[in-house]
Image (spheres, rainbow, N blue to C red):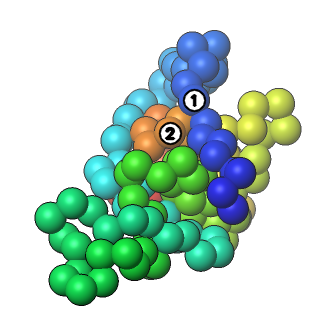
Amino acid sequence: MYDEVFAPVARLETIRLIIAIATQHKWKIFQIDVKLAFLNGFLEGEVYIEQPMGYEVKGHKDKVLKLNKALYELKQTPRTWYSRINSYFLNNRFVKCPHEYDIDVNIIESGDTFIVYLYVDDLIFIGNNPKMFGYFK
């Protein structure tokens, strides 16, 4: 949707919380920046753009192009990325923290814990099982 332009932003208090939890449990802290994250979002609905300069179709300069995927300059691109990664969290049994919406937690039956903090196209994650880090990356 064109009006849905939300993307989570980093809060210093939340980053401090993640660091405090990791320190208390002596867990490692990882941070990743998802390269080209905004190009991995899927558009909901139809989006059209004017033909970019230098790429006009001869004889059809008055036509527009229908996008199949998100582009960086679209207002809704951050939201499409957020929706896609949020779907990943839901499909992999992560639970949203009720007090800090951008924290997702996965605790499996063995007691292994994995916590992810998402902000824009960056993630900070901690946990007690290094195998979970490799799988997540």
How far is disc 2 from disc 1 in space, using C-alphas?
Answer: 6 Å
Instruction: Tell me the crowding category of disc 2: few under 14, some 14 to 19, or many 20 or more residues within 10 angstroms, Cα based.
Output: some
- 113 relative to 134, above or below: above
Q: Where is residue 28 in the image (x, y as percent from the top left)?
A: 41, 32
Secondary structure category for the residue under label 1? loop
The answer to whether residue 47 is visible is yes
Please name the amino acid that badge 2 sits on: Val
User: In the picture, which quadrant includes the N terminus?
Assistant: bottom right
Residue 110: name its quadrant: bottom right
Q: Do the residues labelled 2 and 1 touch (CB within 8 Å)?
A: yes
- Residue most toward the left? 54
User: In the picture, which quadrant includes the C terminus?
Assistant: bottom left
Q: Position of residue 86 (x, y in %)?
A: 63, 58
Q: Which residue is drawn at 29% across and 50% down?
A: 35
Residue 89 or residue 36, whichever sits in front? 36
Residue wearing tag 2: 120
Residue 100: name its quadrant: top right
Q: Which residue is drawn at 37% across and 75% down?
A: 62
